[in-house]
Amino acid sequence: MEVSAARPARVNVKVLAAASLVVVPLLAILVLNLGRDPRSVRSPLVGREAPGFALSPVGGGAQVALDSLRGKPLVVNFWATWCVPCFEEQAALSAGARAFPGVKFVGVIYEDEEARSAQFLKERGEPYPSLMDPEGKTAIAYGVFGVPETFFIDGGGRIVEKHVGPLDSETLALLVRRTLESAR
Amino acid sequence: MRAVITLALALASVAPASSGPATSGPPPSGPPLSGQALDARTESVASLLRCPVCQGLSVADSPATMARNMKAEVREKLAAGYQQEEILAGFERSYGEFVRLEPTLHGVNWLVWAGPIAGLLIGALVVGAVLRRTGRAPAAAEELPSRHTLPDDPRLAVAVLRVRELAYGWPGGIEGGPGARGGESGGPAGSRS
Protein backbone atom coordinates (compact mmCIF):
# COMPACT_ATOMS: atom_id res chain seq x y z
CA MET A 1 0.00 0.00 0.00
CA GLU A 2 2.84 2.33 0.84
CA VAL A 3 4.46 1.75 -2.52
CA SER A 4 1.31 2.68 -4.43
CA ALA A 5 0.84 5.73 -2.25
CA ALA A 6 4.39 6.80 -2.99
CA ARG A 7 3.86 6.46 -6.73
CA PRO A 8 0.44 7.88 -7.58
CA ALA A 9 -0.98 6.31 -10.77
CA ARG A 10 -0.92 8.78 -13.62
CA VAL A 11 -4.10 8.47 -15.68
CA ASN A 12 -3.90 9.97 -19.13
CA VAL A 13 -7.45 11.22 -19.53
CA LYS A 14 -7.17 11.55 -23.31
CA VAL A 15 -5.96 7.96 -23.77
CA LEU A 16 -8.64 6.72 -21.37
CA ALA A 17 -11.36 8.58 -23.30
CA ALA A 18 -10.13 7.29 -26.67
CA ALA A 19 -9.91 3.72 -25.39
CA SER A 20 -13.39 3.97 -23.84
CA LEU A 21 -14.74 5.18 -27.16
CA VAL A 22 -13.64 1.90 -28.74
CA VAL A 23 -14.05 -0.54 -25.86
CA VAL A 24 -17.43 0.57 -24.45
CA PRO A 25 -19.45 0.06 -27.67
CA LEU A 26 -17.79 -3.35 -28.20
CA LEU A 27 -18.64 -4.37 -24.66
CA ALA A 28 -22.20 -3.13 -25.12
CA ILE A 29 -22.59 -5.26 -28.27
CA LEU A 30 -21.19 -8.28 -26.43
CA VAL A 31 -23.46 -7.86 -23.40
CA LEU A 32 -26.57 -7.20 -25.49
CA ASN A 33 -26.01 -10.39 -27.51
CA LEU A 34 -24.99 -12.70 -24.67
CA GLY A 35 -28.54 -14.04 -24.31
CA ARG A 36 -28.95 -14.82 -28.00
CA ASP A 37 -28.94 -18.35 -29.29
CA PRO A 38 -26.29 -18.42 -32.02
CA ARG A 39 -28.22 -21.14 -33.83
CA SER A 40 -31.29 -18.95 -34.02
CA VAL A 41 -30.24 -16.87 -37.01
CA ARG A 42 -32.23 -13.73 -37.54
CA SER A 43 -33.58 -14.30 -41.01
CA PRO A 44 -35.31 -11.39 -42.74
CA LEU A 45 -37.95 -13.95 -43.76
CA VAL A 46 -39.10 -14.67 -40.19
CA GLY A 47 -42.50 -13.08 -39.73
CA ARG A 48 -43.04 -12.84 -43.47
CA GLU A 49 -44.84 -15.00 -45.98
CA ALA A 50 -42.87 -18.11 -46.90
CA PRO A 51 -41.49 -18.07 -50.45
CA GLY A 52 -43.57 -20.31 -52.66
CA PHE A 53 -42.28 -23.41 -54.36
CA ALA A 54 -43.45 -26.24 -56.56
CA LEU A 55 -40.92 -29.06 -56.55
CA SER A 56 -40.85 -32.69 -57.62
CA PRO A 57 -40.40 -35.35 -54.92
CA VAL A 58 -37.28 -37.49 -54.86
CA GLY A 59 -37.89 -40.45 -57.15
CA GLY A 60 -40.44 -38.56 -59.25
CA GLY A 61 -44.17 -38.00 -58.97
CA ALA A 62 -46.49 -35.04 -58.92
CA GLN A 63 -44.99 -31.69 -57.91
CA VAL A 64 -45.60 -30.56 -54.35
CA ALA A 65 -46.43 -26.86 -54.08
CA LEU A 66 -46.30 -24.76 -50.94
CA ASP A 67 -49.81 -23.54 -51.67
CA SER A 68 -51.10 -27.14 -51.52
CA LEU A 69 -49.58 -27.52 -48.03
CA ARG A 70 -51.30 -24.49 -46.53
CA GLY A 71 -53.87 -24.72 -43.78
CA LYS A 72 -51.67 -26.70 -41.40
CA PRO A 73 -48.34 -25.75 -39.82
CA LEU A 74 -45.45 -26.87 -41.97
CA VAL A 75 -41.86 -27.81 -41.20
CA VAL A 76 -39.50 -27.36 -44.16
CA ASN A 77 -36.14 -29.03 -43.62
CA PHE A 78 -33.25 -28.38 -46.04
CA TRP A 79 -30.87 -31.33 -46.04
CA ALA A 80 -28.38 -33.38 -48.06
CA THR A 81 -26.95 -36.89 -47.88
CA TRP A 82 -23.40 -35.47 -47.68
CA CYS A 83 -24.30 -33.56 -44.53
CA VAL A 84 -23.46 -35.46 -41.34
CA PRO A 85 -25.55 -33.27 -38.97
CA CYS A 86 -28.52 -33.98 -41.27
CA PHE A 87 -28.16 -37.69 -40.39
CA GLU A 88 -28.16 -36.78 -36.71
CA GLU A 89 -31.40 -34.84 -36.88
CA GLN A 90 -33.20 -37.22 -39.19
CA ALA A 91 -34.38 -39.42 -36.30
CA ALA A 92 -35.77 -36.39 -34.44
CA LEU A 93 -37.56 -35.14 -37.55
CA SER A 94 -39.04 -38.57 -38.34
CA ALA A 95 -40.21 -38.95 -34.73
CA GLY A 96 -41.59 -35.39 -34.84
CA ALA A 97 -43.54 -36.11 -38.01
CA ARG A 98 -45.19 -39.07 -36.23
CA ALA A 99 -45.69 -37.22 -32.94
CA PHE A 100 -47.35 -34.18 -34.52
CA PRO A 101 -49.91 -35.52 -37.02
CA GLY A 102 -51.42 -32.04 -37.27
CA VAL A 103 -48.17 -30.68 -38.66
CA LYS A 104 -46.87 -31.32 -42.16
CA PHE A 105 -43.23 -32.04 -42.77
CA VAL A 106 -41.35 -31.69 -46.01
CA GLY A 107 -37.68 -32.06 -46.85
CA VAL A 108 -35.89 -30.08 -49.55
CA ILE A 109 -32.71 -31.59 -50.98
CA TYR A 110 -29.86 -29.11 -50.99
CA GLU A 111 -27.12 -29.51 -53.61
CA ASP A 112 -27.34 -33.26 -53.87
CA GLU A 113 -28.03 -35.95 -56.45
CA GLU A 114 -31.47 -37.45 -56.71
CA ALA A 115 -30.21 -41.06 -56.89
CA ARG A 116 -28.19 -40.70 -53.69
CA SER A 117 -31.09 -39.00 -51.92
CA ALA A 118 -33.47 -41.74 -53.05
CA GLN A 119 -31.08 -44.43 -51.82
CA PHE A 120 -30.73 -42.68 -48.44
CA LEU A 121 -34.50 -42.40 -48.03
CA LYS A 122 -34.95 -46.03 -49.06
CA GLU A 123 -32.48 -47.17 -46.40
CA ARG A 124 -33.63 -44.91 -43.59
CA GLY A 125 -37.32 -44.69 -44.29
CA GLU A 126 -39.26 -41.69 -45.46
CA PRO A 127 -42.02 -40.57 -43.11
CA TYR A 128 -42.57 -37.42 -45.18
CA PRO A 129 -41.72 -36.37 -48.74
CA SER A 130 -38.40 -34.85 -49.72
CA LEU A 131 -38.32 -32.60 -52.76
CA MET A 132 -35.61 -31.97 -55.33
CA ASP A 133 -34.44 -28.37 -55.76
CA PRO A 134 -32.27 -28.84 -58.86
CA GLU A 135 -31.14 -25.24 -59.41
CA GLY A 136 -31.21 -24.33 -55.74
CA LYS A 137 -33.85 -21.68 -56.35
CA THR A 138 -35.90 -22.64 -53.31
CA ALA A 139 -32.80 -22.68 -51.11
CA ILE A 140 -31.88 -19.19 -52.38
CA ALA A 141 -35.44 -17.92 -51.92
CA TYR A 142 -35.33 -19.16 -48.30
CA GLY A 143 -31.93 -17.59 -47.75
CA VAL A 144 -30.30 -20.92 -46.91
CA PHE A 145 -26.62 -20.64 -45.95
CA GLY A 146 -25.96 -24.35 -45.48
CA VAL A 147 -27.59 -27.53 -44.26
CA PRO A 148 -29.34 -28.45 -42.13
CA GLU A 149 -31.66 -25.47 -41.87
CA THR A 150 -35.29 -25.79 -40.86
CA PHE A 151 -38.17 -23.38 -41.31
CA PHE A 152 -41.37 -23.45 -39.27
CA ILE A 153 -44.32 -22.06 -41.20
CA ASP A 154 -47.77 -21.51 -39.74
CA GLY A 155 -51.03 -22.54 -41.41
CA GLY A 156 -51.34 -19.10 -42.97
CA GLY A 157 -48.02 -19.49 -44.78
CA ARG A 158 -46.01 -17.17 -42.52
CA ILE A 159 -42.51 -18.15 -41.39
CA VAL A 160 -42.50 -18.31 -37.58
CA GLU A 161 -39.00 -19.65 -36.89
CA LYS A 162 -35.78 -20.53 -38.64
CA HIS A 163 -33.43 -23.06 -37.05
CA VAL A 164 -29.84 -23.47 -38.17
CA GLY A 165 -28.02 -26.72 -37.44
CA PRO A 166 -29.27 -30.16 -36.43
CA LEU A 167 -32.52 -30.32 -34.49
CA ASP A 168 -32.98 -32.48 -31.40
CA SER A 169 -36.40 -33.75 -30.33
CA GLU A 170 -36.82 -31.15 -27.57
CA THR A 171 -35.99 -28.17 -29.79
CA LEU A 172 -38.17 -29.54 -32.57
CA ALA A 173 -41.13 -30.00 -30.19
CA LEU A 174 -40.59 -26.50 -28.78
CA LEU A 175 -40.49 -24.85 -32.19
CA VAL A 176 -43.46 -26.88 -33.47
CA ARG A 177 -45.50 -25.81 -30.42
CA ARG A 178 -44.47 -22.20 -30.98
CA THR A 179 -45.65 -22.49 -34.60
CA LEU A 180 -48.93 -24.05 -33.48
CA GLU A 181 -49.45 -21.26 -30.94
CA SER A 182 -48.69 -18.53 -33.44
CA ALA A 183 -51.47 -19.83 -35.68
CA ARG A 184 -54.03 -19.14 -32.95
CA MET B 1 -42.50 4.89 -56.47
CA ARG B 2 -39.07 3.34 -56.90
CA ALA B 3 -39.35 1.82 -53.43
CA VAL B 4 -42.73 0.35 -54.29
CA ILE B 5 -41.37 -1.20 -57.48
CA THR B 6 -38.31 -2.55 -55.65
CA LEU B 7 -40.47 -4.07 -52.93
CA ALA B 8 -42.90 -5.57 -55.42
CA LEU B 9 -40.04 -7.08 -57.42
CA ALA B 10 -38.44 -8.39 -54.28
CA LEU B 11 -41.71 -10.12 -53.47
CA ALA B 12 -41.93 -11.47 -57.00
CA SER B 13 -38.38 -12.76 -56.94
CA VAL B 14 -39.14 -15.14 -54.11
CA ALA B 15 -42.48 -16.24 -55.51
CA PRO B 16 -42.73 -19.57 -57.38
CA ALA B 17 -39.18 -20.68 -56.98
CA SER B 18 -39.33 -23.72 -59.18
CA SER B 19 -40.87 -22.10 -62.20
CA GLY B 20 -38.18 -19.53 -62.87
CA PRO B 21 -37.69 -16.15 -61.33
CA ALA B 22 -40.48 -13.65 -61.03
CA THR B 23 -43.08 -15.27 -63.19
CA SER B 24 -45.73 -13.30 -61.34
CA GLY B 25 -45.79 -9.76 -60.08
CA PRO B 26 -44.85 -6.62 -61.91
CA PRO B 27 -42.95 -6.90 -65.16
CA PRO B 28 -39.27 -6.09 -65.37
CA SER B 29 -38.60 -2.38 -65.66
CA GLY B 30 -35.74 -2.49 -68.16
CA PRO B 31 -34.95 -3.96 -71.56
CA PRO B 32 -34.06 -7.66 -71.72
CA LEU B 33 -30.33 -8.28 -72.16
CA SER B 34 -28.59 -10.88 -74.29
CA GLY B 35 -25.21 -11.83 -75.69
CA GLN B 36 -22.09 -10.05 -74.48
CA ALA B 37 -24.05 -7.31 -72.72
CA LEU B 38 -25.81 -9.98 -70.66
CA ASP B 39 -22.49 -11.68 -69.79
CA ALA B 40 -20.92 -8.40 -68.71
CA ARG B 41 -23.92 -7.30 -66.64
CA THR B 42 -24.18 -10.74 -65.00
CA GLU B 43 -20.55 -10.46 -63.88
CA SER B 44 -20.98 -6.93 -62.60
CA VAL B 45 -24.21 -7.63 -60.66
CA ALA B 46 -22.83 -10.95 -59.32
CA SER B 47 -19.76 -9.09 -58.07
CA LEU B 48 -22.06 -7.02 -55.83
CA LEU B 49 -23.53 -10.13 -54.18
CA ARG B 50 -21.84 -11.95 -51.33
CA CYS B 51 -21.61 -15.72 -51.69
CA PRO B 52 -23.50 -16.92 -48.57
CA VAL B 53 -21.43 -20.09 -48.15
CA CYS B 54 -17.99 -18.51 -48.70
CA GLN B 55 -15.64 -16.36 -46.66
CA GLY B 56 -15.84 -12.87 -48.11
CA LEU B 57 -16.13 -13.93 -51.74
CA SER B 58 -18.54 -12.45 -54.23
CA VAL B 59 -20.95 -14.61 -56.20
CA ALA B 60 -18.95 -13.69 -59.33
CA ASP B 61 -15.67 -14.93 -57.82
CA SER B 62 -16.85 -18.05 -56.00
CA PRO B 63 -16.80 -21.52 -57.56
CA ALA B 64 -19.33 -22.82 -54.96
CA THR B 65 -22.52 -24.44 -56.25
CA MET B 66 -24.62 -21.95 -54.29
CA ALA B 67 -22.77 -19.05 -55.94
CA ARG B 68 -23.19 -20.63 -59.38
CA ASN B 69 -26.92 -21.03 -58.73
CA MET B 70 -27.19 -17.42 -57.60
CA LYS B 71 -25.26 -16.23 -60.63
CA ALA B 72 -27.58 -18.23 -62.89
CA GLU B 73 -30.53 -16.53 -61.23
CA VAL B 74 -28.93 -13.10 -61.73
CA ARG B 75 -28.45 -13.96 -65.40
CA GLU B 76 -32.05 -15.10 -65.82
CA LYS B 77 -33.36 -11.93 -64.26
CA LEU B 78 -31.13 -9.67 -66.35
CA ALA B 79 -32.19 -11.57 -69.46
CA ALA B 80 -35.79 -10.92 -68.45
CA GLY B 81 -35.09 -7.19 -68.13
CA TYR B 82 -34.81 -6.73 -64.39
CA GLN B 83 -32.52 -3.95 -63.21
CA GLN B 84 -29.54 -4.31 -60.89
CA GLU B 85 -31.28 -2.78 -57.87
CA GLU B 86 -34.37 -4.94 -58.37
CA ILE B 87 -32.22 -8.07 -58.46
CA LEU B 88 -30.15 -7.11 -55.42
CA ALA B 89 -33.33 -6.28 -53.48
CA GLY B 90 -34.67 -9.74 -54.33
CA PHE B 91 -31.65 -11.47 -52.81
CA GLU B 92 -31.68 -9.08 -49.87
CA ARG B 93 -35.20 -10.19 -49.06
CA SER B 94 -33.96 -13.76 -48.57
CA TYR B 95 -30.54 -13.20 -47.03
CA GLY B 96 -30.81 -9.75 -45.51
CA GLU B 97 -28.45 -6.90 -46.25
CA PHE B 98 -25.58 -9.31 -45.54
CA VAL B 99 -25.84 -10.46 -49.14
CA ARG B 100 -24.86 -7.04 -50.47
CA LEU B 101 -21.12 -6.54 -50.73
CA GLU B 102 -21.73 -2.79 -50.90
CA PRO B 103 -24.13 -1.83 -48.11
CA THR B 104 -26.69 0.81 -49.02
CA LEU B 105 -26.32 4.33 -47.62
CA HIS B 106 -28.80 4.41 -44.78
CA GLY B 107 -28.89 4.20 -40.99
CA VAL B 108 -25.84 2.69 -39.33
CA ASN B 109 -24.40 1.90 -42.76
CA TRP B 110 -23.25 5.52 -42.98
CA LEU B 111 -20.57 4.51 -40.49
CA VAL B 112 -19.18 2.00 -42.98
CA TRP B 113 -18.79 4.69 -45.62
CA ALA B 114 -17.99 7.69 -43.44
CA GLY B 115 -15.95 5.77 -40.83
CA PRO B 116 -12.75 5.39 -42.87
CA ILE B 117 -12.88 9.04 -43.99
CA ALA B 118 -13.50 10.18 -40.41
CA GLY B 119 -10.66 7.93 -39.24
CA LEU B 120 -8.37 9.43 -41.86
CA LEU B 121 -9.30 12.97 -40.79
CA ILE B 122 -8.80 12.19 -37.09
CA GLY B 123 -5.48 10.53 -37.92
CA ALA B 124 -4.39 13.59 -39.93
CA LEU B 125 -5.34 15.85 -37.01
CA VAL B 126 -3.34 13.71 -34.57
CA VAL B 127 -0.31 13.61 -36.91
CA GLY B 128 -0.62 17.38 -37.42
CA ALA B 129 -0.73 18.01 -33.67
CA VAL B 130 2.28 15.75 -33.05
CA LEU B 131 4.25 17.43 -35.86
CA ARG B 132 3.43 20.87 -34.51
CA ARG B 133 4.65 19.79 -31.08
CA THR B 134 7.91 18.28 -32.38
CA GLY B 135 8.35 21.30 -34.69
CA ARG B 136 8.50 23.50 -31.63
CA ALA B 137 11.14 21.30 -30.00
CA PRO B 138 14.27 22.79 -31.69
CA ALA B 139 13.35 26.26 -30.42
CA ALA B 140 13.20 24.89 -26.92
CA ALA B 141 16.51 23.11 -27.42
CA GLU B 142 18.29 26.40 -27.90
CA GLU B 143 17.60 27.23 -24.31
CA LEU B 144 19.27 24.07 -23.14
CA PRO B 145 22.93 24.31 -22.19
CA SER B 146 25.20 23.26 -25.05
CA ARG B 147 27.37 20.21 -24.74
CA HIS B 148 30.50 22.08 -23.79
CA THR B 149 28.98 23.99 -20.85
CA LEU B 150 29.89 22.69 -17.45
CA PRO B 151 28.00 22.32 -14.20
CA ASP B 152 28.42 25.00 -11.54
CA ASP B 153 29.71 22.52 -8.99
CA PRO B 154 33.52 22.63 -9.49
CA ARG B 155 33.99 19.02 -8.44
CA LEU B 156 31.29 17.88 -10.85
CA ALA B 157 32.76 20.07 -13.59
CA VAL B 158 36.14 18.42 -13.17
CA ALA B 159 34.49 15.01 -13.35
CA VAL B 160 32.64 15.98 -16.55
CA LEU B 161 35.85 17.24 -18.13
CA ARG B 162 37.56 13.99 -17.21
CA VAL B 163 34.76 11.94 -18.74
CA ARG B 164 34.91 14.05 -21.92
CA GLU B 165 38.58 13.56 -22.13
CA LEU B 166 38.20 9.84 -21.74
CA ALA B 167 35.36 9.64 -24.24
CA TYR B 168 36.48 12.10 -26.90
CA GLY B 169 40.20 12.52 -26.25
CA TRP B 170 39.90 16.18 -25.18
CA PRO B 171 37.78 17.98 -22.56
CA GLY B 172 35.67 20.18 -24.89
CA GLY B 173 32.91 17.62 -25.64
CA ILE B 174 31.86 16.27 -29.07
CA GLU B 175 33.81 17.67 -31.98
CA GLY B 176 31.71 19.76 -34.32
CA GLY B 177 28.95 20.16 -31.72
CA PRO B 178 27.51 23.56 -30.91
CA GLY B 179 30.44 25.75 -29.99
CA ALA B 180 32.88 22.87 -30.37
CA ARG B 181 36.62 23.53 -29.89
CA GLY B 182 37.76 27.01 -29.28
CA GLY B 183 34.67 28.03 -27.40
CA GLU B 184 36.05 26.52 -24.29
CA SER B 185 39.42 26.28 -22.71
CA GLY B 186 38.69 23.08 -20.89
CA GLY B 187 38.41 24.41 -17.41
CA PRO B 188 35.51 24.97 -15.09
CA ALA B 189 35.74 28.66 -15.98
CA GLY B 190 33.91 27.91 -19.23
CA SER B 191 30.80 26.85 -17.43
CA ARG B 192 27.58 28.73 -17.91
CA SER B 193 25.09 29.18 -15.20
Image (cartoon, rainbow, N blue to C red):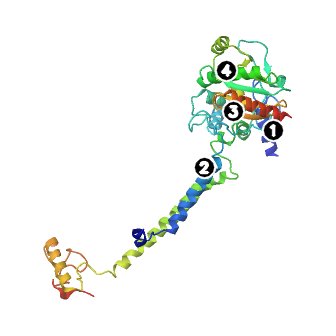
What number is the disc on residue B153?
Answer: none
At horizontal 65% and vertical 50% (from top left) the residue drawn is: A32
**Residue pointed to by mark 4:** A91
* Mark 3 or mark 2: whose residue is earlier in sequence: 2
Q: Is residue B186 left or right of residue B89?
A: left
Q: Nearer the viewer, residue A84 or B12?
A: A84
Q: Position of residue B141 (x, y in %)?
A: 34, 78
**Residue pointed to by mark 3:** A163
Q: Which chain letter goes with mark 2?
A: A
**Residue pointed to by mark 1:** B8
Residue A176 lies, with reference to residue A3, above or below; the image says above
Residue A28 lies, with reference to residue B99, above or below; the image says below
The answer to whether tags 3 and 4 share a subunit is yes
Q: Secondary structure at mark 2?
A: helix
Q: Amino acid at mark 4?
A: Ala
The answer to whether tags 2 and 1 share a subunit is no
The image quadrant where one finds the C terminus of chain B is bottom left
| Cα gap from disc 3 to disc 4, whole angstroms | 16 Å
Q: Which chain letter goes with mark 1?
A: B
| Residue with the most extreme front position | A1
Q: Amino acid at mark 2?
A: Leu
The answer to whether tags 1 and 4 share a subunit is no
Q: Secondary structure at mark 3?
A: strand
At horizontal 78% and vertical 41% (from top left) the residue drawn is: B6
**Residue pointed to by mark 2:** A30
